[in-house]
């Protein structure tokens, strides 16, 4: 009798092969399930236009201490590098000559006053005699002139005395402003003069401080025209600083003014900001980076940086959720950032749904399953888990 077992075994194998082929054909026909992507809906919002400019710190006030009289320095009355207040004595010049000048001027004034008193008395005595014509009219006129000249001499000597006193006070050189004083450029025993070119010391007031920034005149003109046309709004005058070591300065400043002339050599305009400096962190001459919102774009579009891609030529593009849940590739203009977002100035309109998650393998026209960005994913059991459980 013919053994049918090999035939049955072969038929079973063919049936299994046909079943696998049918399953494979079904998967290819139906395709894998559409990938899930996260999207954000585009909306306009005001976005500040932040400007970063390099700058230098400048002392709020700077004064060079200079002598106003000639003489030898007898003493230095301050500690180098310390804080001095306006009017505090800094140097003492040998004042003996100036004291002698005061004494001499005082004596001259006393002599002039005595002469004036005698001249006035003589004029008073001659007055009634002149009315009675007991003396010549010319004698009385001369007496009046002598009295007036004596009073003028008193005024002259009084001014000379005040000048001598001022010179005596100048023998003590005082601080013209309050601030921190640097090193002394002269020592006791040094000869100084009122016409010398070298200062004795320099005082700088460092609280508050100025920061002078340089901005291109072309950029400033473009910004002003945009504000005048209504394309952007004027920004805030508040300024933030980044120090030389990369750290942020703890106090905000305020823009004070923009210079009225353009530097012909650099084509830049100087902007000056004022900063509080209570801890003395800022020193004159430091290089800093100033950041401030120079204008505000009232209708800008922000996109998370993860949703913006770049072509080989550097141009930006995004994928949108199109009709029938198809991905649509679109070029945009995104030239600057604001925080963690790109500022899009062209290519999008309010209501567009931009894909920001799951874009690594997206292609134009691909079928997608869009959900709002950052939605929790639904994780199902692995394939075959249900079948395996059922078999058990």
Image (tube, rainbow, N blue to C red):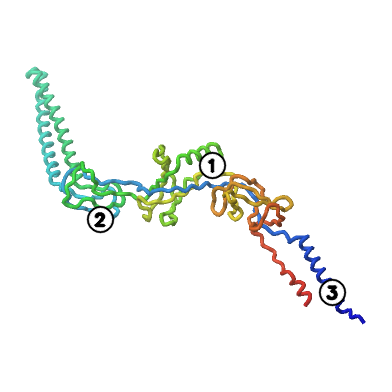
Of the residues tagged 1 and 2, which is closer to the observer? 1
Expressed as whole percent of the image width and height from the top left, the position of residue 86 reads 28, 48
| Residue at disc 3, secondary structure | helix
Res 12 label = 3
Q: Is residue 223 above or below residue 152?
A: below
- Front-most of 155 and 294? 294
- Front-most of 269 and 308? 308
Apparent side of residue 214 relative to residue 62 in the rendered image (left or right): right
| Residue at disc 2, secondary structure | loop
Task: Quickly name the residue at label 2.
Answer: 79
C-alpha separation, residue under disc 2 versus residue under disc 3: 107 Å
Query: Residue 149 sits in which quadrant?
Result: top left
Q: Quadrant of the C terminus?
A: bottom right
- Front-most of 103 and 180? 180
Q: Are marks 1 and 2 in contact (CB under 8 Å)?
A: no
Task: Quickly name the residue at label 1.
Answer: 233
| Residue at disc 1, secondary structure | strand
Of callouts 2 and 3, the N-terminal one: 3
């Amino acid at each position: 009798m013919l053994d049918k077992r090999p035939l049955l075994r072969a038929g079973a194998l063919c049936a299994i092969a046909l079943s696998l082929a049918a399953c494979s054909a079904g998967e290819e026909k139906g395709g894998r399930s559409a990938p899930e992507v996260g999207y954000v809906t585009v909306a306009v919002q005001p976005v500040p236009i932040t400007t970063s400019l390099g700058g230098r710190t400048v002392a709020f006030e700077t004064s060079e201490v200079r002598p106003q009289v000639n003489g030898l320095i007898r003493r230095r009355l301050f500690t180098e590098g310390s804080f001095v207040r306006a009017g505090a004595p800094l140097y003492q010049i040998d004042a003996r000559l100036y004291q002698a000048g005061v004494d001499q001027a005082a004596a001259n004034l006393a002599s002039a006053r005595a002469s004036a008193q005698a001249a006035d008395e003589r004029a008073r005595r001659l007055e009634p005699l002149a009315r009675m014509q007991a003396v010549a009219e010319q004698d009385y006129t001369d007496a009046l002139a002598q009295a007036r000249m004596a009073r003028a001499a008193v005024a002259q000597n009084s001014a000379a005395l005040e000048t001598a006193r001022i010179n005596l006070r100048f023998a003590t050189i005082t601080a013209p402003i309050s601030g921190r004083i640097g090193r002394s450029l002269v020592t006791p025993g040094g000869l100084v003069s009122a016409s010398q070119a070298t200062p004795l010391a320099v005082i700088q007031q460092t609280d508050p401080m100025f920061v002078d920034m340089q901005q291109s005149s072309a950029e400033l003109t473009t910004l002003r025209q945009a504000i005048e046309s209504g394309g952007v709004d004027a920004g805030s005058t508040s300024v933030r600083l980044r120090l030389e070591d990369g750290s942020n300065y703890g106090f905000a400043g305020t823009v004070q003014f923009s210079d009225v002339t353009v530097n012909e050599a650099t084509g830049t305009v100087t902007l000056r900001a004022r900063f509080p400096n209570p801890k003395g962190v800022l020193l004159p001459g430091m290089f800093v980076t100033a950041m401030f919102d120079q204008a505000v774009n009232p209708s800008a579009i922000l996109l998370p940086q993860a949703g913006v891609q770049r072509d080989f030529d550097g141009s930006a593009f995004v994928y949108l959720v199109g009709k029938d849940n198809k991905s649509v590739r679109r070029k945009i203009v995104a030239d600057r950032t604001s925080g963690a977002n790109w500022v899009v100035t062209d290519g999008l309109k309010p209501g567009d749904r931009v894909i920001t998650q799951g874009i690594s393998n997206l292609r134009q026209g691909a079928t997608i399953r869009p959900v709002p960005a950052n939605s929790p994913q639904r994780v199902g059991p692995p394939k075959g888990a249900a079948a395996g459980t059922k078999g058990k």
